[in-house]
Amino acid sequence: MTASDKEITDNLAEIKATIPPHVTLVAVSKTHPSEAIEVAYRAGHRVFGENKVQEMEVKATILAKDIQWHLIGHLQSNKVKYIAPFVTLIHAVDSEKLLEEIQKRAAANNRVIDVLLQVHIAAEETKFGFDAAELNEFLASKRWNNLPNVRLRGLMGMATFTNEDSQVRSEFRGLKSIFDASKILLNNDFDTLSMGMSGDYQIAIEEGSTMVRIGSSIFGAREYR
């Protein structure tokens, strides 16, 4: 159930107080109504994350135009065209095929779209992403130079869903190591490491995250529908 207006405002303030200035907070608004986003917007927040293309498209149409929309969920190639005109950052880019489609749609909209490459760091096989070897081969090949309308901004990853903080910390630390190695192959635009959600964002920040994705701790329990 979505939190009350006061709860959203208070939750947002409390979380921002725990996040260093160099870390970007993505308020994950997926499944929550536009009215909840408006509450956070009035509190001064501008960066929101959605995981479904259709839901983000609808919200972007009716909400303030200065909102920065982040697509944080798995993205199918055939849906890129719907968000290409307005999306600020695509987090979970997990294949060259998807990068090529983003390039095509960004060029059609005369835009450069920022993306993060998703790296598979969790023990679960269900999570998407490049493995470390695939990522290194792609970056070293410089094939990304053939995508002038796509800007590689960094990496993202999701830790294993577990209560074992030591495992989560180890996975985040491993992703930070991959990020540092990848940065050498790119340029100064490669500056974003998106890792950490409501349950583990403080560990992620300690291990080098520059962007955290927090939903339920702001908006309340997710509303499945």
Image (spheres, rainbow, N blue to C red):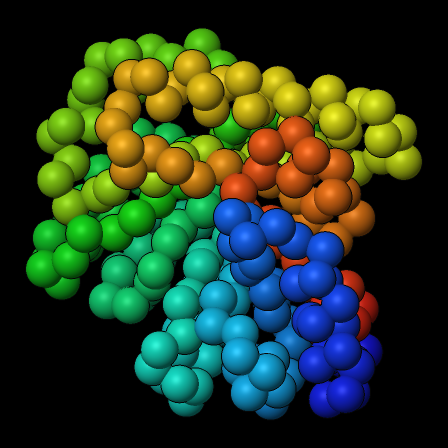
User: How many numbered marks does the figure carry?
Assistant: 0
- Whether residue 193 is visible to the viewer of this picture, yes or no, is yes
Left or right: where 58 falls relative to 6 = left
- Looking at the image, is 190 positioned above or below residue 106? above
In this view, the residue in front, 100 or 168, is: 168
Q: Residue 220's image quarter?
A: bottom right
Left or right: where 214 falls relative to 181 = right
- Whether residue 97 is visible to the viewer of this picture, yes or no, is no
Q: Residue at x 54, y 17 (%)?
A: 177
Return the x and y of residue 150 as percentages of the image width and height: 22, 43
Return the x and y of residue 143 as percentages of the image width and height: 19, 22
Q: Quadrant of the C terminus?
A: bottom right
Q: Quadrant of the N terminus?
A: bottom right
Q: Residue at x 55, y 59 (%)?
A: 26
Q: Residue at x 41, y 74 (%)?
A: 67
Return the x and y of residue 134 as percentages of the image width and height: 41, 15
Left or right: where 10 falls relative to 112 = right
Q: Residue at x 70, y 62 (%)?
A: 17
- Looking at the image, is 11 positioned above or below residue 23? below
Q: Residue lying furthest right in this view? A: 163
Return the x and y of residue 50 as percentages of the image width and height: 53, 63
- Looking at the image, is 87 positioned above or below residue 105? below
